[in-house]
């Protein structure tokens, strides 16, 4: 690992329309960046060759589960941040469904301390505090305390807030602490007992479905409140057409709503569950083909603001059970860039839009630092080899858990080097 004050010139990377792009790094920051030949590097500075590789600012994942405290057998802060580093992420926002729940300053501070000790150069960890104490949806968590301890947002995560009055107060109080409210949209009654998306596949497979309208009803509640209060709400892992249509409508009215989706809602649909593989069980569930088409349009046209992985590690013994007993969720940190780059190769997204969805988009919403390759920006960037193929397995994945729908499959495109604050972290 080089020293943080190390000076070097990254040479010849591909960056958007530039076939050859150079970056001069000094004291952990971008000193200059531009097409090759446009930068005057001091004599004797070390060169790092990057020909043939794509150059991106370190990405931000605004929705991960790192499982510490409480479920370290699935993941912990050390392994989760290592997975983030190898996945191209320079910062992650960790959800509050730990044990104890992150509903107080001592949990937030202990998470930050663990990140600092295990990954002093990053990736950065930004904890998300609980919206309600114990995530039980009854009483608001102490937001001022959470904000002062370092939380960047609040959320009730997988336990959607049914009580509209409580949710309203959460949006109001969070704004006074400059915390974003992130909502997992799901009507708990319409979703009761679900195993997958409601529709033809669920009928054929004999599994209880939950309809997309259950998500959309809560999206509607959230955008109506956001408009009424003129305050922001961020919608987590949006998965279906009706939600997208409501968000698009809300944005035309100037409502302060932002939304994320995850790679799996753009790449997989509910027919995949014909295998009954519990690796495909996730919340919200994989939807129908028409929903996948709507999600692809929405990421391209800006209705969906950002990508996030919803990295949700679970141990093998928890997933290797009957379908109705298996927990929901996929790991995602190390597969996300390759999976979503495929959308650029298919012409669904431009390279610039892809970068916005993973970097400047989340930075803008959550007010986080990001590298824009301007002088003075943090020297946080990674190289991506679009031609390298690799297999998702125990050797390639740094996360403690392997619960990926792509387990055993070959992916094309891999993060090949990553610097944070000018320090090469792998
Ligand atoms: O699939 C999911 N898993 N969705 C969530 O909202 C929660 C997550 C988890 O914590 O496992």
Image: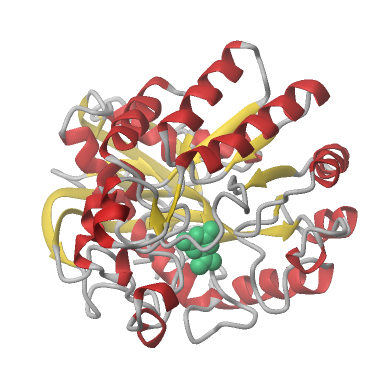
- Residue occupying the point 76% across, 58% down: 150
- Choose between 394 and 416: the one closer to the eye: 394
- Choose between 383 and 126: the one closer to the eye: 126
Query: Going by the picture, which residue comes out furthest to the top?
Result: 252
Q: Is residue 112 above or below residue 185?
A: below
- Choose between 360 and 160: the one closer to the eye: 160
- Residue occupying the point 40% across, 68% down: 83
Q: Quadrant of the C terminus?
A: bottom left
Residue 42 appears in the picture as rendered: no
- In which quarter of the view is residue 176 placed? top right
Question: Measured from the top left, where is residue 11 in percent x and y?
Answer: 24, 42
- Residue occupying the point 23% across, 37% down: 343
Q: Quadrant of the N terminus?
A: bottom left
Q: Is residue 254 above or below residue 291?
A: above
Name the image colouring.
secondary structure
Horizontal side, residue 293 vs residue 363: left or right: left
Horizontal side, residue 84 vs residue 56: left or right: right
């Amino acid at each position: 690992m080089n020293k943080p004050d190390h000076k070097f010139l990254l040479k010849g990377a591909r960056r958007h329309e530039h076939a050859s792009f150079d970056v001069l790094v000094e004291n952990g920051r971008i000193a200059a960046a531009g097409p090759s030949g446009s930068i005057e590097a001091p004599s004797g500075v070390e060169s790092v060759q990057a020909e043939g590789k794509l150059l991106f600012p370190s990405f931000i994942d605004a929705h991960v589960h790192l499982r510490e405290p409480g479920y370290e057998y699935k993941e912990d802060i050390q392994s989760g941040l290592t997975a983030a580093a190898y996945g191209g992420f320079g910062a992650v926002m960790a959800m509050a469904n730990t044990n104890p729940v992150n509903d107080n300053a001592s949990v937030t501070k202990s998470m930050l301390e663990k990140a600092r000790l295990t990954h002093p150069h990053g990736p950065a960890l930004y904890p998300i505090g609980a919206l309600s104490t114990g995530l039980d949806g009854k009483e608001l968590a102490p937001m001022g305390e959470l904000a002062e301890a370092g939380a960047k947002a609040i959320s009730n995560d997988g336990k959607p807030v049914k009580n509209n009055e409580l949710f309203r107060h959460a949006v109001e109080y969070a704004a006074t602490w400059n915390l974003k409210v992130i909502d997992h949209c799901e009507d708990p009654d319409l979703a009761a007992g679900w195993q997958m998306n409601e529709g033809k596949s669920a009928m054929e497979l004999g599994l209880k479905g939950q309809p997309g309208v259950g998500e959309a009803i809560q999206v509607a509640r959230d955008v109506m409140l956001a408009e009424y209060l003129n305050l922001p709400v961020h919608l987590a892992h949006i998965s279906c057409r009706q939600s997208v249509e409501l968000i698009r409508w809300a944005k035309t009215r100037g409502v302060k709503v932002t939304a994320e989706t995850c790679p799996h809602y753009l790449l997989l649909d509910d027919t995949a569950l014909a295998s009954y593989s519990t690796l495909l069980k996730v919340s919200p569930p994989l939807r129908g083909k028409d929903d996948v088409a709507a999600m692809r349009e929405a990421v391209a046209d800006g209705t969906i603001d950002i990508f996030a992985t919803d990295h949700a590690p679970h141990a093998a013994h928890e997933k290797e059970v009957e379908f109705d007993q298996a927990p929901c969720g996929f790991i995602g940190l190390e597969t996300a860039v390759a999976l979503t780059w495929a959308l650029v190769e298919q012409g669904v997204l431009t390279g610039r839009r892809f970068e916005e969805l993973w970097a400047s988009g989340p930075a803008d919403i959550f007010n986080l630092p990001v590298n824009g390759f301007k002088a003075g920006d943090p020297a946080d960037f990674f190289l991506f080899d679009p031609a390298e193929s690799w297999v998702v397995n125990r050797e390639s994945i740094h996360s403690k858990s392997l619960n990926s729908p792509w387990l055993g499959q070959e992916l094309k495109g891999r993060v090949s080097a990553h610097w944070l604050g000018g320090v090469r972290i792998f």
